[in-house]
Amino acid sequence: MKHRNGRPPHAAGVFAAACLAAAWAGGACAAPAPGYDTLLQALDRAPVLREAEALRAAADARVRQAAARPNPELSVEIEAIDGSGPYAGGAARETTYAITQPLELWGQRRARVEAARSAAGAAGLRALDARWAAAARLALACAEAEAAARRDALAAEALSLAEADAATAARLVEAGREPRLRQVQALAAVEAARARHAEARAAREGAFARLAAVAGLDAPVTAVADDLLEREPLPARPTAAGEPLPVRIASAELAAARGGVDVARLRGLPQLGATVGRRRFREDAEAAWDVGLTLSLPLLDRNRGALDAARAESAAAEARLEDARRAALAEREAALAALRSAAARTAAADAGVAAADEAYRLGRAGFEAGRIAQLELRDARAALVAAREAAVDARLQRARAEIDLARLEGRAPFGATP
């Protein structure tokens, strides 16, 4: 007796199992989207990176502005413009043209420039952090899309296996070797597999849509190539290689906050200005030079509120730095543990796939020969599907651990170069 698609029953089972193995390996049936390395090269187009670069450029511009000296002030003063007696009609009018240049003493300009440079350094580190964060998001979107595509293919092939088993059960029922209940049970298993396939297809479409959004692709993603799930993670950098990027950012922000304290303190000191003027006397058409000094008196406003605010911001930056150091250490240890766990889980899952594959092959042959019951075959099929899904999950977990570690180490995942 032949299967309804024209293949012998045993050949149908072997073909379905081979398809399932190909699906687990990640075969694609359509032209895939660009790979991770290709997408990473176009990362500069990402809006979040354009924003970070613009903020870095703004911080650099503030450094240039901080180095600018204050503008001079031009003043015109007219005395004795009118009056009585000899001052009537402005006969004794005196006109003075003066320029006053504020003098930045006490290191005010230097403190302002240093604070701006510290802030620009923090902005540059944040731009770099945004680049690695974008690379991590892209890698995660690619890995999740690959995993979703594999799960969809697995669900499709699991449906094919269930249909093949149902066809064999129908043949055995027709031959009187199995009760009709077994055929009904097989058809129920087919419908359950079809529902799981629909769920996997929806999850795949969602993962493809997220990948297109993260990568900034104009065309929708219809297929992905196996790229990241089979890559081996990079060895972890030694702890002495340098502080993690989040710690460096917090340290730069602390330096900027301390610079702000110096700027606020110096703004509360007296401000000095030098004046040079030229006075003209209308009465005898003569002229004379005037010089003078101006000194602000910080009696009513000594910038106390701004200084207290700057000191509070500096204290907050110190707390953030301490928290960043603790968090970076804990997150690194967690990422390394997850990486070790994922490696062990992947090896175990691959061994489980091999065992489940052999068990299903033997179960299929025994079922067709009438030596085992349909329930045992269904259990063997479910174990095979579960083993292959576990292998996909293990590889995705391994990719996520590498992505987390790369993010902490300030690099692109899997050693790629953006």
Image: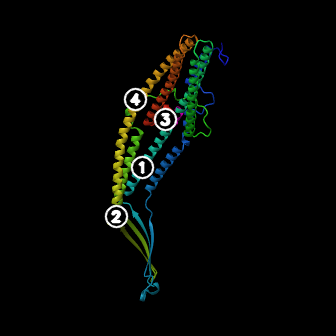
What amino acid is at disc 3?
Ala
Front of the two marks 1 and 4: 4
Residue at figure coordinates x 46%, y 36% from the top left: 411
User: Mark 3 sits on what residue?
Assistant: 412
Marking on residue 119: 1
Toward the left, the furthest residue is 299
Q: Is residue 288 above or below residue 232?
A: below
Is residue 214 inside the magenta stretch? no
Q: Secondary structure at mark 3?
A: loop
Residue hosting label 2 = 301
Residue 292: x and y in percent read 37, 70
User: Could you tell whether 324 is left or right of 178 in the image?
Assistant: left
Q: How is the image coloured?
A: rainbow
What is the magenta range? 137-143
Viewer-nearest of discs 4 and 3: 4
Instruction: Work out which quarter of the rendered image holds the N terminus and state it.
Output: top right
- Are the residues at dot 3 and dot 2 in contact (C-beta closer than 8 Å)? no
Question: Can you see residue 107?
Answer: no
Residue at the bottom extreme, as displayed: 85
- State the image coordinates of residue 122 (x, y, percent, origin top left): 42, 46
Please tell me which residue is depicted at 36% across the width and 39% down the height of the picture: 325
Taken as a whole, is the magenta stretch helix, strand or loop? helix
Residue 375's place in the image compared with 34, above or below, is above
Mark-to-mark CA distance, 1 and 4:
35 Å
> Which element carries disc 1, helix, strand or loop?
helix
Tell me the distance, in whole angstroms, between the alpha carbons under discs 1 and 2.
26 Å
Choose the circle earlier in sequence order: 3 or 1: 1
Q: Within 10 Å of the Cα at label 2, are there few (<14), some (14-19), or many (20+) other Cα atoms?
A: few
Give the residue type that dot 2 points to. Asp
Q: Position of residue 352 (x, y in %)?
A: 48, 19
